[in-house]
Each structure stands twice: as C-alpha cells, then as structure tokens.
Amino acid sequence: MVERTTALQQALGLREAITRLNRRLRQARPVGDLTMAQLSALTSLELAGALSPRELADVERVQPPTMTKIIAKLEERGMVRRDPHPTDGRQVILRTTEPGRLAYEQVQRAHNEWLADHLADLSAEDLETLHRAAEIMKKVARAA
Amino acid sequence: MVERTTALQQALGLREAITRLNRRLRQARPVGDLTMAQLSALTSLELAGALSPRELADVERVQPPTMTKIIAKLEERGMVRRDPHPTDGRQVILRTTEPGRLAYEQVQRAHNEWLADHLADLSAEDLETLHRAAEIMKKVARAA
DNA sequence: CACGTTCCTTAGCCTAGCTAATAAGCCTGG
DNA sequence: CCAGGCTTATTAGCTAGGCTAAGGAACGTG
C-alpha cells in the first residue's frame, strides 16, 4: 500500500535529481559538438529509421518549429538527410546519413563513458537500481 | 561483480530517460511561471537560508554570470532579496523573501502533484526504485 | 600601499524552447 | 471539378538559460 504522501516525497526527490543530473550531463560534451537535443533527435531518428519532422517532434515531445531548428543544425552538419515524401508533397522524410550514424555512435559512446566513469564508484546494487529506474522513467515520460 | 559493459548499458538508458523526463517536467509548469532553473535556484536558496551568488552558482552547477541572470529574474518577481555582506563589500547575500517562500511552496507542490499523478499507476516497488534512484542520482551529480 | 586575487556584473554569443503567422499541398462536399 | 478547409512544414520573433571574455570594485598581503 503506497500512501500519497510517500509518493509525493519520492516525486520531489526525483525532480531535483533529474534537474541536477541533467545539467551535469549537458556540461559533459566530450567529443563532437552535438548538443543534448541534437543527440536525442538523432537517436530517435536512428532507432525509427525514417520519420517526418512532425513525427520526430512528437517523439521528442517538442513543437514542430523547435524540431525544424534542430533538424536544420543536424542537416548543416550532414548528419541527417531530407527526402521528399513519395505521395504527399507536404511531408518530408528524414533519415540519418552514414556520417550521422558514425557521429551518433561516437558521441553516444563518449557520453556514456563519461556517465559510466561517474558511476564507477557505485555498488552493483546501485547500478541495478539506476538501470531499473531508467526503464520506469522512460515509461512515465512516454505515457501521459 | 559488475562488468563494464553492463554499466555502460545502464548509463545509456539513464541518459535517455533523464533527457526525456526532464523535457516533460519542463513542459509541466502548472502554476506560477517559475522555470525549472528558477525553481531549482529558489529551492537551493530556501534550503540553505542565505548564500552568495557564487555559492548558489556552485550549488546549482552553473557559471556565475548564469546565476546573475536567474537571480535577476527572481528579484524582479520579488522572490529573492539581495543584501550587502556585513564585512565584505564585494559579496552579496541572497535570501528568499516571504512571497518567494510562498511561491516556492506553491509551485513545488504543483510540480510534485503533476509528477505524483503521473506516477500513480506505478507499483509500490517501482516507486521505491525511483526513490532510491533519485538519491543515487543526486549523489552522482554532487560528486565529480 | 601597490599589486594580485576574488566577487559580481555586463556584454555578447549560442541553443532550445514557445506562439503566431505563412506557404504549400491535400482532400472533400457541393 | 474546384473552393474552402485541414495538415505539414517553415519562418519570424520572443524568452530563458547556458557559456566565455572582459570589466570594475573591494579585499588582502608582501
């Protein structure tokens, strides 16, 4: 039985933790100059294969104009390609390019190494907790 | 025994989860118009009682000029007061005002209710995992 | 007491978010 | 079959929040 008060206290701690750790992660941009937003969009696109800007905006939970900007940055760097939709002239199809995939993997690896380094002191139990929490957090973010 | 590969995988999931959930939390600004950064600074100041801009910047893990801006916004809204340091003419002492405390509590409550609402479907076990993860994440953010 | 250090701020830049408005293409009802 | 309305994407313009570099004021010490 979970009381409401308990859930609220947990919520408080989680929000603080996310705010702080998110800032730390943003600061740790060790290789390449992909920002968090760019890396996140590139990741979603890579995993999905091909998406319209609208769909990518929905996945990333941002408004379409915001996604337009992020895509523009990625396109400048040659990491994303914009193809016309075969039947619908309004839509655009986004795909990662080969350089995009390589940059993605490289930055992803560097980011994760940074995080792993900073997790190095934690016990196996703590790591397991973080792992499970990450899954739960993604589920929560996906819903609602 | 924790293998490096395992830790890396966990790190990957955690970064994604933080990015996504942080965006959702930023969008959920139900009462008042305090942003995440402002709320976070106000919280740190409220908990500490009184801090110099430099100290607050260190706590919040941002550079001093960034904190100057955030403080300016909070001061505009009358939520933070800037007093001269009794002996050191360079320093400034920041404190939350009474309106600041009230706004902080109100927004804090609203934010946490939003989060608690979205955590309502989770099992007691998942909530416990999130709670423990939040503690660990704050520790990681504090270190390094 | 002069010089280096510390503290805060200013100036100027960038990213990332938003809304409102625009342009282009699709589709449907009369 | 085409007029008007919806959808998609972009542009324009705003704000917040992050950074570095550079400045002025105050401190403290050799």
Image: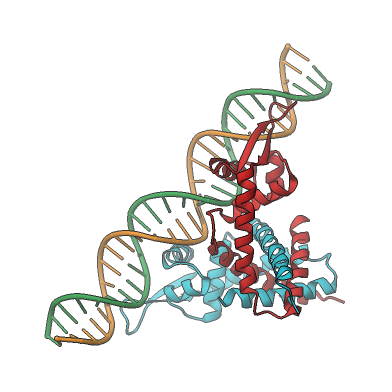
Chain colours: A cyan, B red, C orange, D green
Residue B130 position within the rendered picture, expressed as x and y whole percent measured from the top left: 73, 72
The residue drawn where x is 46% and y is 78% is A51
Residue B5 position within the rendered picture, expressed as x and y whole percent measured from the top left: 76, 76
The residue drawn where x is 73% and y is 78% is B126
Q: Is residue A29 visible?
A: no
Whether residue B21 is situated above or below residue D3 in the rendered picture: above
**Foreground of the two, B69 or A51:** B69
Residue B128 position within the rendered picture, expressed as x and y whole percent measured from the top left: 76, 74
The residue drawn where x is 57% and y is 73% is A43
Whether residue C2 is situated above or below residue B36 in the rendered picture: above
Drawn side of residue B49 relative to residue B69, left or right: right
Picture quadrant where residue B144 is located: bottom right
Drawn side of residue A53 relative to residue B52, left or right: left
Picture quadrant where residue A127 is located: bottom right
**Foreground of the two, B119 or C3:** B119
The residue drawn where x is 64% and y is 43% is B98
Whether residue A109 is situated above or below residue C11 in the rendered picture: below
